[in-house]
Image (spheres, coloured by chain):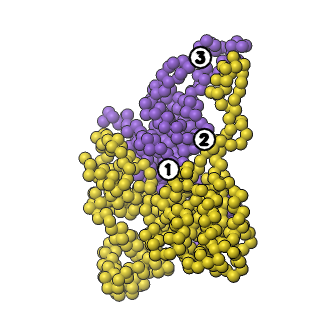
Amino acid sequence: MFVGFFYALREKGVPVTPTSFLKLQKALSMGLINTLEDFYTAARSILIKSERYFDTYDSIFAHTFKGVPLTDPEEIELTEIVRALLQEWLKNPADIAQALGLDEKELAKFTPEELEKYFLERLKEQDGQHHGGHKWIGTGGTSPVGHSGYHPGGMRIGGASRNKSAIKVAMERRYKDYAQDGPLTEFQINEALKRLRRMVPSGPKDVVNIEKTIYETMRNAGEVEIIFDRRLTDRLKVVLLIDNGGWSMDPYIEVVKTLFNYSRSQFKDLQIYYFHNTIYDQVWLDPQRQFRPEPIDEFIRREPETRLIMIGDASMAPYELTHPHGAIYIDQRQALPSIERLKFLAKTFRHSVWLNPQAEKIWGYTWTIGVIREIFPMFELSLDGLEKAVLHLMSRN
Amino acid sequence: MNQDNQIYHFEGASRYVLDEELAQIVNVSMALEMPLLLKGEPGTGKTMLAHSIAESLKMPLIVLNVKSSMKLLEALYQYDTLTRLNDSRFGDSCRNVSNIEEYIKMGKIGQAFTADVRTVLLIDEIDKADTDFQDDMLDVLDQMQFDIMEIDKTIKAKNRPVIVITSNAKKDLSDPFLGRCNFHHIAFPQPDMMRRILGVHFPGLNSDLVEACIASFYRLRELRGVEKKPATRELINWIRAIKADPDFKVKSLAQGSVPYLGILFKKSGDLSIATQQASRLRL
């Protein structure tokens, strides 16, 4: 039973194991699962082992048991938006009547479902006529509805409402914020960065190594010889350079900063510096890039084992990167072109990456990205890219 | 049906509001005899769930608080060599020195196994320990038995405990570990649910106050740049503080003045952000 469902999960990249599938069969045979709702929750808790895959599970569930098309998130999203919008507008029926070009009395005849459908139809019409017209709903700025995955305020998933069918619950896609694809959220980056931790022995020798003590005591013919070891601690140093200048980085700064503040608790030694577009003689410890400059040359005094993470869109005018006096600020007199500085950093720190918040597929259109990619390994600032970056940072060579 | 006596059914407890989804998962895990792994934001009631399972099924609760340096053996049993040495030197105890078994003390898992009744075993914050600990422990929990090397004895579980494991996701758990658990992620409760949770904790609380508190609480959660968002636990403590304050007026909350921010925001950075922004939150 449900073999198709199982393989659908596998195909979509959810790690489900045959053992857990058998467990599910066992649960079914025990008569624990009597309704589709039961099946939804039971199968999820048995098969899916990380909240990251809950969203994929939801959509596959809806697909398998309802035939909801898989590759049409737009549609679901749209419905979601419409519903939320309607709820907001229904508080003020006159408004919506006007917006739809209907009489208020006529509107009152509709049931909410009808209204929703009607509204959606209208919306699609509009989409057809002015291409991409439905955008006004998501990006108007005044809309009360949060659009797509990234929602700075937090999660909008719920635990309570269960007077709906499982399909509807699944179609709500409550776990979207945890999903692997889509924009990065704070939760995900924290998960990924944890892999950067590495415990190494350091500090005073104050832990008794019992096995060695016994061995040495024996070798000493019974005379007690106590062997101490160093304690394991996380000694990894991380230097983070964030491009926080210009409108191009604006949408990402808040995310990036929060993320790395989170990760402060993860690393013993994390330093954050700021720059604009690219690096010249100095970087700054304060986000305003005014008060606490730090010369790049000083970086050579740091341990070469320090992990260097650069975050920026790497997009600028070519001269900013290659011309000796390329800085866009007049007060930054420098002798070396920025590209030399970047090379210097890459040479000083063997383990370095550049994280780019732009999607990888558009990197090819910016010349400076190509140049910087040759200096630093560049990864996308998404969960996937971050994981690759961390892997790269942790590799030994 | 005869079986009803054996299949335990969990339906929530006096201090815990359970959503149906979670209840179903708890029941399935108990029936399948699999440990239930709970993840979720700190303060959303992962630990509380185990307490309420124990309460509602009337089973004793055994809590194993995992520490980072913990070895599996500590959780199973301890061989108290020091007492034995002491006894053999001075011989003033009633224990029989040549019987090692008298110097074996059961750890938390051992206690759960040897208890005469079925227990709820809560393994709290498993992610603090290293991967080896986790895997080895799951082996023990899978087979429901372990060996005491010193006396060459196998301890078998008299009753299979109901096992609840919580994780704060500090570290990733290994795949074999996950494979043996049922998994659930406790989502942050939505306002409706929160109302019910507060109703359980503060029966008879003025509904205006509840509404105002919930409204400002969810607004405070939306603040940008906050590291640790306040969770259910913080909200409950906060309302407790508000209740204790005789000068507090519901109106002032609506006007944007939020007292006792320190209860909601525990990190100094967060607190200063919240203090700055809170005044702007008018309802």
Q: Residue at x 31, y 82 (%)?
A: A128
At mark 1, the secondary structure is strand
At mark 3, the secondary structure is helix
- Distance from the alpha carbon under mark 2 to that under mark 3: 29 Å
Residue A266 visible in the snapshot = yes
Mark 1 — on which chain does it sit? B
Q: Three-letter amino acid code at disc 1?
A: Lys
Contact? badges 1 and 2 (CB < 8 Å): no
Residue bearing mark 2: B68
Contact? badges 2 and 3 (CB < 8 Å): no
Is the same chain shared between marks 1 and 2?
A: yes
The C terminus of chain B is located in which quarter? bottom right
Q: Residue at x 49, y 34 (%)?
A: B136
Q: Nearer the viewer, residue A257 or B189?
A: A257
Q: Residue at x 36, y 48 (%)?
A: A16
- Give neighbour class at mark 1: few <14, some 14-19, many 20+ (Cα, 10 Å): many
The N terminus of chain B is located in which quarter? top left
Marked residue nearer the N-terminal end (2 or 3): 2
The chain drawn purple is chain what?
B
- Distance from the alpha carbon under mark 1 to that under mark 3: 40 Å
Residue bearing mark 1: B39
Marked residue nearer the N-terminal end (1 or 3): 1
Marked residue nearer the N-terminal end (1 or 2): 1
The chain drawn yellow is chain what?
A
At mark 2, the secondary structure is loop
